[in-house]
Amino acid sequence: MVDAATLATLLVAGLASMFMAWAIGAGSSGSTPFAPAVGANAISVMRAGFFVGLLGFLGAVLQGANVSEAVGRELIGGVSLTPTAATLALIIAATLVAIGVFTGYPIATAFTVTGAVVGVGLAMGGDPAWAKYREIGALWILTPFVGGGIAYVTAKTLRNDSWDEQATVPVLAGLVGVILANVEFVVLGPPGEGATIAQTIAGPLPLSPIAGQAVATLALGALSGLALYRDLRVDADRGQRRFLLVMGGLVAFSAGGSQVGLAVGPMLPLVEPRGVPVTAALVGGGLGLLVGSWTGAPRMIKAIAQDYSSLGPRRSIAALIPSFAIAQTAVFFGIPVSFNEIIVSSIIGSGYAAGGGGVSASKMGYTVFAWIASLVGAIVVGYAGYTGVSLLF
């Protein structure tokens, strides 16, 4: 039997979690994926908001478990978040995100949630999870260089007149197909586990598991490349727009899988002991993302599409490919990652390929400072907040 105080705490934590999910859906993860396609007039703003909501919801349910478990259980050792601690972490993170939304400061959701959970966990007497911190730090530090580097090389290649664009872009589509073939989906695996498309296809083949997966991966990559090659030969502009739509869909799906854990992860230590399965929590978080995308994303998509339309289709493709790859890497390893960081670094990389592309060094420095301040501030406020609440009650 749940007492009234615990029930009230769970209710407040649930509301904070849903607000976080809404803010994520209405923010970068809901607005960025289809902005290039909108800028290229491949899809309308309202349709983009509709599809990004559905795809984000599917990504949250089918791929959100890894990051959710990491946020809820792997950021602090020796203790499990209590209802008060989880509620406080969510309220702090949600408040910081709200401040960023209303003041225009680029507050990174992943940094605030991670910092708040670590802060309250340390205040509870927990031990730092150094191994997990090294994983998280490595991805956060490498993302600007890897994402920006891949975007730079891709955009540079597409801008090179000595390369046939109608042959180069299908090769990129083939690489995307190779990545997609090795993305895990819970519906393809046994209960409680996931499986990739390549593993599923390789099952009936008379080959070893490794050889079968390699054949399936190469086949899916080749089919993806050939399909786009055919489209480009028939109508180059239409084929390019379709590729942008596909990439937008993949990035939206990946955003749901990588970002929902930031909203529902701190809730897992509260709800799982009471018999609520992870899938149910992911569905709730996914619905929050969906509502955020449908209510807040269209306005953001329209605004961001103006920036993306200035990038052009080539730079948009160059920015979305590494965004998809990095987001799926974060999902696979269960690492909370900032979608803003992924997108911004990819745009900057593609911008430098165009001779600078209007990239502002001062704005870059301000954004990085805001990210670091988000993390440090959340840790400090989380620690101080839990300590203060413990002394009072």
Image (tube, rainbow, N blue to C red):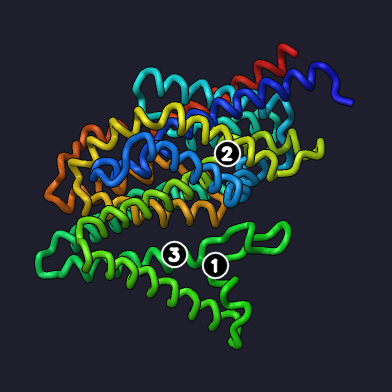
**x, y (%) of residue 113?**
54, 33
In this view, the residue in front, 385 or 272, is 272
Residue lying at 68% horizontally and 60% vertically, measured from the top left: 193
- Residue underneath mark 3: 179
Q: Quadrant of residue 240?
A: bottom left
Residue 129 at least partly seen: no
- Residue underneath mark 1: 197
Left or right of 310? Residue 343 is right
In this view, the residue in front, 146 or 253, is 253
Left or right of 216? Residue 86 is right
Q: Secondary structure at mark 1?
A: helix
- Residue underneath mark 2: 286
Q: Amino acid at mark 3?
A: Ile
Q: Secondary structure at mark 2?
A: helix
Q: Earlier in the sequence, mark 1 or mark 2?
A: 1
| Residue lying at the far left of the rendered structure | 161
Q: Quadrant of the N terminus?
A: top right
Q: Amino acid at mark 2?
A: Gly
In contact (CB < 8 Å): disc 3 and disc 1 = no
Q: Quadrant of the C terminus?
A: top right
Residue lying at 27% horizontally and 65% vertically, measured from the top left: 231
Mark 3 Cα shell of 10 Å, populated few (<14), some (14-19), many (≥20): some
Residue lying at 19% horizontally and 36% vertically, measured from the top left: 360
